[in-house]
Amino acid sequence: MRAFLAVIVLIALVATIGLPVYLGPDDISSCSGPSDGKCAPADAIIVVSGGDTEARTAEAVRLYNNNWASLLVFSGAARDPNSPSNAQAMQIQAVESGVPYDAIILEEFATSTVENAANTASIIERYNLKRVILVTSAYHQRRTSIEFSKKLGVDVQIVNHPVRNDSQWSQWWWATPYGWWLGISELIKILVTKA
């Protein structure tokens, strides 16, 4: 019985520590700001809507204000045909935070992560973007990066930077059934995406 409990505790520890590290890669976590090498600034910051869209937008604005890129690309369709698109809502939030309109490009038709990647790929090509920072929630970062890599190929460098804590995911994700549901469902979606 003790061995069984020890295995359960070990699995729980690995899951609570390893799952967020796997799901939320952050390529600039050790950077104090944009500089050279892996901390080089990007051509654009791309934000996909969904989950806690406001937290994702706020993190992109923070990166923009810290000179990580001079262009923001917001991707997301309207949830309701009678409301503004998620991309427009992100634009409003960014402009209210001081970002100029001409520093923002909208992609307003994506209704899924696959469509975020596919629709944004044409913007990346049109503007000849070679290095982009991809912002989403931490639980969603790896799968989003995989989808974007599939659409963009090797010509565009994707720099991952997740929102670590938002209304759906935090360091205490494991303390709620919803946190476990998000983590496990993302693992399954990643397996399907890689297949």
Image: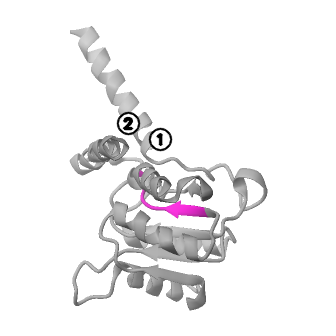
Q: Position of residue 89 (x, y in %)?
A: 39, 83
In the picture shown, does residue 106 fall above or below 124?
below
Q: Is residue 105 magenta?
A: no
- Quarter of the picture containing the C terminus is top left
Task: Please name the amino acid that badge 1 sits on.
Answer: Val
For numbered disc 2, what is the local secondary structure? helix
Q: Position of residue 77 (x, y in %)?
A: 32, 77
Pick the front one: 150 or 102: 150
Pick the front one: 103 or 7: 103
Between the residue at mark 2 and the residue at mark 1, the CA separation in whole angstroms equals: 9 Å
In the picture shown, does residue 138 fall above or below 191?
below
User: Around disc 1, counting alpha carbons within 10 Å, would you say few (fewer than 14), some (14 to 19), or many (20 or more)?
Assistant: some
Q: Which mark is residue 21?
A: 1
The earlier-in-sequence mark between 2 and 1 is 2
In the picture shown, does residue 51 fall above or below 11?
below
Q: Position of residue 183 (x, y in %)?
A: 31, 45
For numbered disc 1, what is the local secondary structure? helix
Q: Which residue is mark 2?
A: 16
Residue 50 quadrant? bottom left
Name the residue at 42% across, 55% down. 147
Please say if the residues under marks 2 and 1 sit with CB atoms less than 8 Å apart: no
User: Around disc 2, counting alpha carbons within 10 Å, would you say few (fewer than 14), some (14 to 19), or many (20 or more)?
Assistant: some
Name the residue at 42% across, 48% down. 171
Task: Please name the amino acid that badge 2 sits on.
Answer: Thr
Q: Which mark is residue 42?
A: none
- Quarter of the picture containing the N terminus is top left
Q: Is residue 1 left or right of residue 169?
A: left
In the picture shown, does residue 56 fall above or below 102?
above
Q: Is residue 32 left or right of residue 57?
A: right
Which span is picked out in magenta?
Answer: 132-138
Q: Is residue 26 left or right of residue 3?
A: right
Name the residue at 61% across, 57% down. 155
